[in-house]
Structures are given as structure tokens and as C-alpha cells.
Image (tube, rainbow, N blue to C red):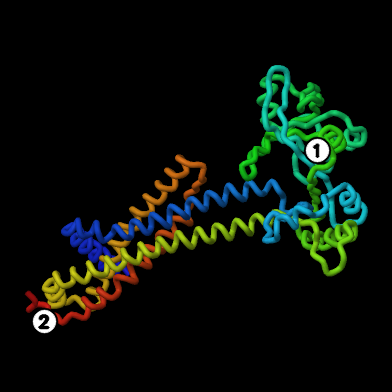
Amino acid sequence: MIKLFIEIWESVKIALQALRANKMRTFLTTLGIVIGITTVIGIHSIIHGLNNAFYTSISALGSDVLYVQKFSWFSNKDWLEARNRKNITMKEVNAIEKQATLVAAVAPVVGTRKTVKYGSEQLKDVTITGTTEDYVTTANVVPEFGRPVSRQDVDHNRAVCVIGWEVADRLFKKVNPIGRRIKLGAYKFRVVGVLEKRGSLFGQNLDTEVIVPFGVFQKIYGSRRWMTIEVKVVSPARVEDAKDELIGILRRVRKVPPGEDNDFAINQQDMIADMYKRLTTALYAVAFGVGTIALLVGGIGIMNILLVSITERTREIGIRKALGAKKRDILWQFLIESLVVSGIGGLIGIVLGFLAAKAISSATSLAASVSLTSAFIGIVFIAIVGLFFGIFPAYKASKLDPIESLRYE
């Protein structure tokens, strides 16, 4: 084992000496490897960062929550056909609450955008959500302090509200908002709770939300608005069963004849995740396609340079063989030289890939996350290129006849 390591180390030193003797040629040879590895590492780091940000965002939707809506989030159906469907109403909400056996909570949700004011402070384009007490469960929106909208608030149409973290921060500064009244358009609401900080979801700031009782919302802003029914399933394992149950209930309530398509949609988090996976798979394919072409060019460059090097060092090979070097020693020498060239280019590519990902992340809104997986992928590519494109020149060098090699001029 020790002898093997000594032989490998000697081969590495010979390879480095050969590379130092031809710096420009080495630079041009490694250029393709550098470009290929930089591309693969850079794009993989960006996609990895996007994945982290994406899955953190959609976790707010909940994997066990279904969204009954007029439109499907992703559909190839004609928009006009979907637009002419009957609106989702409280009739469907009541039917689900009475008949469904696999749901833990049901909340109707309607919304609009308004300017919110407190004293001289105001915040524009705030999302006003009209819903019931079950919204706490379906949307997992828990007040950081104060309380949520209660059943009594909904039943008695009380003008109370729960405000988002940023609404409280921007309007009340250092004042406790609980018990104070804010204006939503022309109407005053008493603040009963402040939500914990939630961040953004698909570019929408979830911290600029104001939640009011469902009946109050309809009384002020009208009842002819598109409604979403949020349904929390009893268990993530029963989501598909719950979907089948909801479809049966909704078809009966909306009087959809047998054989006809549903005139409603049941959306869920998995649909977004599936669409995202398809998009990122395409990005991965493009990245690896570009990277593979660059690595192929770089690998061919390594092979050509090694073949040239063998021709130039034929007498050296002959002398080594005359002094007792075996075919295996010559093969190792040039194979290691190929791995060294590929390794130098690959390591530079890994560093540049990480720097490129960080630079793009700093200059744009794209997230980038450097991971050990990215580095591992780069190392695997380096090893494959070095071995694949070095084996032929190394084998050719090992087969040279020592006598003919010594005569070579």
C-alpha cells in the first residue's frame, strides 16, 4: 500500500513538472473544464437556494389544506368556460361543514385591498381578509399577542380585526395596538390581536394582512366576491380521501349532472410543488447540458494535449522503461497527469461557481445556497472527465516499445 502511494505521489510530481513546463498549454487545456464546472456549480447553487426559499414559502399553505375555488391554479381549460362557472357561496361552506367527515376545520375566505389608517399614519394596499374563527386552523395564522377573531365576533358581526405584524409595526410604532381603532377605508375596527411575523408567499407580503369577521366584510364590501373555502383535513394521510369526499358533496350541492366535469376546482400545495419541480427539472437539464458540452470540449482538450505530450516525451518513456518502469507505471503516470489537469480546472471551477452564485444572489433577488452536494457533484464530474479522457493516451503511452522509443528523435 505504501509503495502504491509513493508511486502515485511520484507520478503527481512528474505531472506537475510537465504542467509547469507548459503553462499556457495547461491554461488553455483547463479552460473548458473551468467553464463546465463553473456552470454546473453556479446553477446548482442557485437552484438549491431557490428550492429552500420556495419550500419555506409554500409551507405556509399547509400540505393538509385544500382550497375549494372557482378556478384551478393550473389548468389547460378555456378561461371563459371557467369564468362562467357559478361562484362558490356559503351554501357550499354549509354543506361541507354538515356532511364532510374527513375535515378538521372549514373557513370561507374573501378579500380585498384597502388603505389602513391610524391617526396620521397610513399603510396602502393592505390585504383585508373576511373569514371565520376557523381561519386560525386552516391558514395557521396565530396571533403573537392579543386574540384571534372569535365565534362571537363572527356571529354578532363585531367590528374587530386582527392585524399583521408589519401593519402593527408601521402604524403603531411603539404604541400597543390592542384595543385601539384603525380605519379600513371609511370604517373603524377595534384591534384585538397582532399576528406573528410570516414573511412573503410568491411575492405577496403576508405581514400586511388585516383579518375581519366574515359577515362584517360582506356587509361593508359586498357579498358578490369570489370566495375560497379553506378546508383543513383531519390528517395529511387522508388528503386524497378528503378530496373525493369534497367532490361528491360539491357536485350534489351545485347539481352537476353525472358525466359532466366538475364546475369547481380543489387546489392544494402539491400542485404548486409539482409545477415547481417541472420548472427546476428543465433548468437542471439546461445547466447540465451546457456544463456537459463544456466538459466534453475540455476533456477532448486534455486528451489531445496528453497525446502531444506523449509524442514529445517518447524518449523519456523509453528511458524509464529501460530503467525498469513497467507498463502499469507509465499508464499511471499519464492517467494521473490527466486527473491533475482535470482536478486543477475543476477546483478553480468549483470556487468560481460558488463566487458566481453568490454574486448573482447579491445583485438580484435570486437566492443562492452553496451546499456540499454542489461541491460533491463538481468533484464527481472532475473525476469522470479526468479518467475518461486520460485512459486512451495513458494506455497508448504504456504500450510504446522501449527500444523504438529510445531511437525516437
Residue at the spot of label 1 = 130
Image marks 2 and 1: residues in contact by CB distance under 8 Å: no
Q: Which quadrant, please, contains the C terminus?
A: bottom left
> How far apart are the two marked residues, 2 and 1, measured between alpha carbons?
91 Å
Residue nearest the observer in this picture, 213 or 217: 217
What type is the residue that disc 1 sits on? Gly
| Count of numbered badges drawn on the protein | 2
Note whether residue 133 is visible: no
Label 1 element class? strand
Residue at the spot of label 2 = 404
Check the image and report above or below for 290 versus 201: below
**In the image, residue 193 lies at what x, y percent?**
78, 30
Residue 71 relative to residue 58: left or right: right
Q: Could you say which quadrant of the image residue 384 lies in?
A: bottom left
At x 68% / y 59%, what residue is drawn? Answer: 75
What type is the residue that disc 2 sits on? Glu
